[in-house]
Image: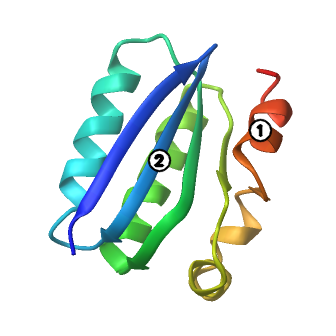
Amino acid sequence: MSLQVGTEKIGTTLVVRLAGELDHHTAELVRDRVEQELDKGVCRNLIFTLEQLVFMDSSGLGVILGRYKRISQLGGRMSLCAVNDSMRKLFELSGILKILPVYDTETRALTEMGEV
Protein backbone atom coordinates (compact mmCIF):
# COMPACT_ATOMS: atom_id res chain seq x y z
CA MET A 1 0.00 0.00 0.00
CA SER A 2 1.19 3.52 -0.74
CA LEU A 3 0.48 6.87 0.83
CA GLN A 4 -1.89 9.58 -0.34
CA VAL A 5 -1.22 13.11 0.87
CA GLY A 6 -3.84 15.81 0.62
CA THR A 7 -3.34 19.39 1.76
CA GLU A 8 -5.75 22.26 2.22
CA LYS A 9 -5.21 25.76 3.55
CA ILE A 10 -8.00 26.96 5.83
CA GLY A 11 -7.26 30.46 7.05
CA THR A 12 -3.78 30.32 8.56
CA THR A 13 -3.96 26.56 9.12
CA LEU A 14 -2.56 23.90 6.84
CA VAL A 15 -4.56 20.67 7.01
CA VAL A 16 -2.65 17.57 5.91
CA ARG A 17 -4.73 14.45 5.28
CA LEU A 18 -2.84 11.17 5.15
CA ALA A 19 -4.19 7.87 3.84
CA GLY A 20 -2.23 4.62 3.63
CA GLU A 21 1.18 3.90 5.12
CA LEU A 22 3.59 6.51 6.47
CA ASP A 23 6.95 4.74 6.60
CA HIS A 24 10.56 5.13 5.51
CA HIS A 25 9.46 4.90 1.86
CA THR A 26 6.92 7.74 2.09
CA ALA A 27 8.18 9.97 4.93
CA GLU A 28 10.23 12.21 2.64
CA LEU A 29 7.20 12.85 0.43
CA VAL A 30 5.18 14.09 3.42
CA ARG A 31 8.07 16.13 4.80
CA ASP A 32 8.71 17.82 1.44
CA ARG A 33 5.04 18.50 0.73
CA VAL A 34 4.43 20.09 4.14
CA GLU A 35 7.66 22.08 4.05
CA GLN A 36 6.79 23.47 0.59
CA GLU A 37 3.49 24.75 1.95
CA LEU A 38 5.02 26.18 5.12
CA ASP A 39 7.77 27.90 3.12
CA LYS A 40 5.09 29.99 1.38
CA GLY A 41 4.62 31.79 4.70
CA VAL A 42 0.81 31.72 4.62
CA CYS A 43 0.17 28.99 7.18
CA ARG A 44 1.10 29.29 10.81
CA ASN A 45 -0.76 26.28 12.24
CA LEU A 46 -0.80 22.65 11.19
CA ILE A 47 -3.30 19.81 11.56
CA PHE A 48 -2.58 16.21 10.58
CA THR A 49 -5.80 14.30 9.85
CA LEU A 50 -4.99 10.60 10.24
CA GLU A 51 -8.35 8.87 9.88
CA GLN A 52 -7.20 6.90 6.81
CA LEU A 53 -3.66 6.18 8.03
CA VAL A 54 -3.24 2.43 8.54
CA PHE A 55 0.47 2.17 9.38
CA MET A 56 3.27 4.37 10.67
CA ASP A 57 6.85 3.55 11.61
CA SER A 58 9.54 5.62 13.33
CA SER A 59 10.17 7.58 10.12
CA GLY A 60 6.58 8.77 10.24
CA LEU A 61 6.95 9.76 13.88
CA GLY A 62 10.05 11.71 12.89
CA VAL A 63 8.10 13.59 10.22
CA ILE A 64 5.42 14.57 12.72
CA LEU A 65 7.93 15.64 15.38
CA GLY A 66 9.96 17.59 12.85
CA ARG A 67 6.89 19.50 11.67
CA TYR A 68 5.97 20.18 15.31
CA LYS A 69 9.39 21.74 15.84
CA ARG A 70 9.02 23.89 12.71
CA ILE A 71 5.51 25.07 13.64
CA SER A 72 6.66 25.85 17.18
CA GLN A 73 9.51 27.98 15.80
CA LEU A 74 6.93 29.89 13.72
CA GLY A 75 4.94 30.57 16.88
CA GLY A 76 2.07 28.43 15.67
CA ARG A 77 0.18 25.42 16.95
CA MET A 78 -0.10 21.86 15.71
CA SER A 79 -2.57 19.09 16.41
CA LEU A 80 -3.60 15.64 15.30
CA CYS A 81 -7.15 14.56 14.59
CA ALA A 82 -9.22 11.52 13.67
CA VAL A 83 -6.54 9.20 15.06
CA ASN A 84 -7.54 5.53 14.98
CA ASP A 85 -6.87 3.19 17.89
CA SER A 86 -3.68 1.61 16.53
CA MET A 87 -2.14 5.01 15.73
CA ARG A 88 -3.21 6.38 19.12
CA LYS A 89 -1.37 3.52 20.83
CA LEU A 90 1.77 4.31 18.83
CA PHE A 91 1.51 7.98 19.79
CA GLU A 92 1.05 7.07 23.45
CA LEU A 93 4.12 4.83 23.43
CA SER A 94 6.22 7.45 21.66
CA GLY A 95 5.21 10.26 24.02
CA ILE A 96 3.80 12.46 21.25
CA LEU A 97 0.48 12.75 23.07
CA LYS A 98 2.29 14.63 25.83
CA ILE A 99 3.13 17.48 23.44
CA LEU A 100 0.38 17.40 20.80
CA PRO A 101 -3.37 17.66 21.32
CA VAL A 102 -5.57 15.11 19.58
CA TYR A 103 -9.11 15.90 18.48
CA ASP A 104 -11.84 13.54 17.35
CA THR A 105 -12.65 15.51 14.21
CA GLU A 106 -11.00 17.93 11.84
CA THR A 107 -13.75 20.46 12.56
CA ARG A 108 -12.95 20.34 16.27
CA ALA A 109 -9.24 20.79 15.58
CA LEU A 110 -9.95 23.75 13.29
CA THR A 111 -12.20 25.27 15.94
CA GLU A 112 -9.38 25.03 18.48
CA MET A 113 -7.08 26.76 15.97
CA GLY A 114 -9.64 29.56 15.67
CA GLU A 115 -10.46 28.81 12.05
CA VAL A 116 -14.14 27.84 12.42
How packed mark 1 is, by other alpha carbons closer than 10 Å (few <14, some 14-19, many 20 or more), is few
Query: Up-down: is 12 above or below 31?
Result: above
Q: Quadrant of the N terminus?
A: bottom left
The image shows residue 11 at horizontal and vertical percentages of 64, 13
Q: Which residue is mark 2?
A: 17
Residue drawn at 43 percent across, 69 percent down? 61
The image shows residue 62 at horizontal and vertical percentages of 38, 65
Residue furthest to the left: 25
Query: Up-down: is 31 above or below 81?
Result: above
Q: Which mark is residue 107?
A: 1
Mark toward the start of the polypeptide (1 vs 2): 2
Q: What residue type is disc 1 on?
A: Thr
Give the side of residue 93 with respect to residue 14, left or right: right
User: How far apart are the two marked residues, 1 and 2, measured between alpha carbons?
Assistant: 13 Å
Query: Up-down: is 9 above or below 105?
Result: above
Q: Quadrant of the C terminus?
A: top right
Where disc 2 sits, the SS reads strand
Q: Which mark is residue 47?
A: none
Quadrant of the image occupied by residue 23: bottom left
Residue drawn at 82 percent across, 23 percent down? 114
Q: What residue type is disc 2 on?
A: Arg
Residue drawn at 75 percent across, 33 percent down? 110
How packed mark 2 is, by other alpha carbons closer than 10 Å (few <14, some 14-19, many 20 or more), is many
67 and 55: which is toward the camera: 55
